[in-house]
Image (cartoon, grey):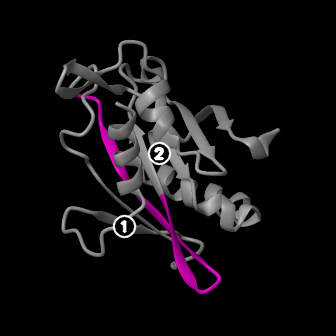
Amino acid sequence: LFCACLLVTALAQFVPLQDANLTTLNAAHDPNITISYKVPKGACKTAFDAQKQFSGWVNIPVEGRSTSLFFWFIEAREPTSTLTIWLNGGSGGSSMSGFWQENGPCEVVEKDKDHLEVKAREWGWDRASNMLYIDLVKFILSAPEFVILTKPAALSRLLLHHPHHQRQLRFLQRNNHLSS
């Protein structure tokens, strides 16, 4: 089970060079910052089929090269404008561990001795809030001060594209040794 979650997290760091299914937005304040996302079909079974999901990358130039932050957004089970942002990071910590193992809308479970399956998590935090998981594994180690300056700007661009989630940012969780 742990290996399956680790594999998903490891693969998330590789940004596809071209994908016809990606929607790409440019940040209004900096055209060098882009957000590329798509609807991940079949990866995460949620409680309701009508729950929208988006996953992708926020691409931010850092010291002459592009750095990509992986994110996964899941709408709440019931309509709400509340948004919870889940951030893990630091020394190898991935927000995908929170997504798959702690509070996300789905989980990997052992179906039988030789098979795993993804199923909806009964008590996922998507019961009460829209969820945005942002992966900071490599990024926060390379430029922590830059994260503070640019992440809100990139996030605001994503929220501008989905304005019904702008009004109530209720909770910010950072599970990280740097936050203490």
Q: Give above or below for 167 relative to 64.
A: above
For this view, does 42 lie left or right of residue 59?
left
Residue in the picture at 42% in, 54% down? 161
Q: Magenta region's main secondary structure?
A: strand
Q: Give above or below for 96 relative to 103.
A: below
Residue 163 is labelled as: 2
Residue 58 is labelled as: none
Q: Of residues 77 and 106, which is closer to you in this image?
A: 106
Q: Position of residue 8 (x, y in %)?
A: 35, 46
Q: Position of residue 90 (x, y in %)?
A: 66, 51
Residue in the picture at 35% in, 18% down? 121
Considering the numbered disc 2 on the image, is that residue within a helix, a strand or a loop?
helix
Q: Which residues are magenta?
A: 50-69
Q: Is residue 63 rendered magenta in the image? A: yes
- Sequence-first disc among 2 and 1: 1
Q: Give above or below for 104 relative to 86.
A: above
The answer to whether one can see residue 103 in this image is: no
Q: Answer few, some or many: residues within 10 Å of disc 2's Cα (few below 14, many 20 plus, some between 14 and 19).
A: few
Residue in the picture at 28% in, 19% down? 47
- The outermost residue toward the right is 180
Q: Is residue 112 rendered magenta in the image? A: no
Where does label 1 land, which residue? 15
Residue in the picture at 48% in, 18% down? 128
The answer to whether one can see residue 24 in this image is: yes
Disc 2 and disc 1: Cα gap in Å? 26 Å
